[in-house]
Image: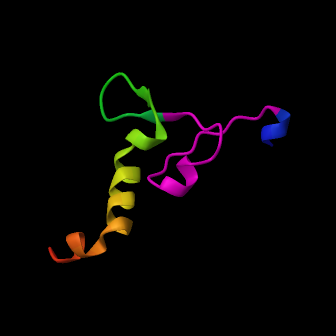
Amino acid sequence: MAEQDSQFVVATHSPILMALPGADILSFDTAPARRVRYEEVEHVTLTRDFLNNPEAFLRHL
């Protein structure tokens, strides 16, 4: 569908889906909504930090 110039609006917290090349990521954390870079998305940084050091997170459980 992308090859046919289709557009999709997808609401997700998935860092995997947000990594789609060419995706525009909008944050609705504040008004008005703003475009953010993939590396700035909280769920991306949180997932990356967890995967790099799960013990730092799991010790709080």
Q: Magenta part of the protein: which range?
A: 5-25
Image location of residue 23, percent across then percent down: 60, 38
Seen from the viewer's position, the closer of residues 44 and 33 is 44
Q: Which quadrant would residue 8 be assigned to in this image?
A: top right
Image location of residue 41, percent across then percent down: 39, 43
Q: Residue at x 36, y 51 (%)?
A: 45
Determine the residue located farthest toward the right in the rendered image: 4
Above or below 38: residue 45: below
Main SS of the magenta part reads loop
Q: Residue at x 56, y 33 (%)?
A: 24
Is 14 magenta? The answer is: yes
Q: Residue at x 70, y 35 (%)?
A: 7
Left/right placement of residue 61 relative to residue 8 reads left
Image location of residue 61, percent across then percent down: 17, 77
Above or below 4: residue 44: below
Is 19 magenta? The answer is: yes
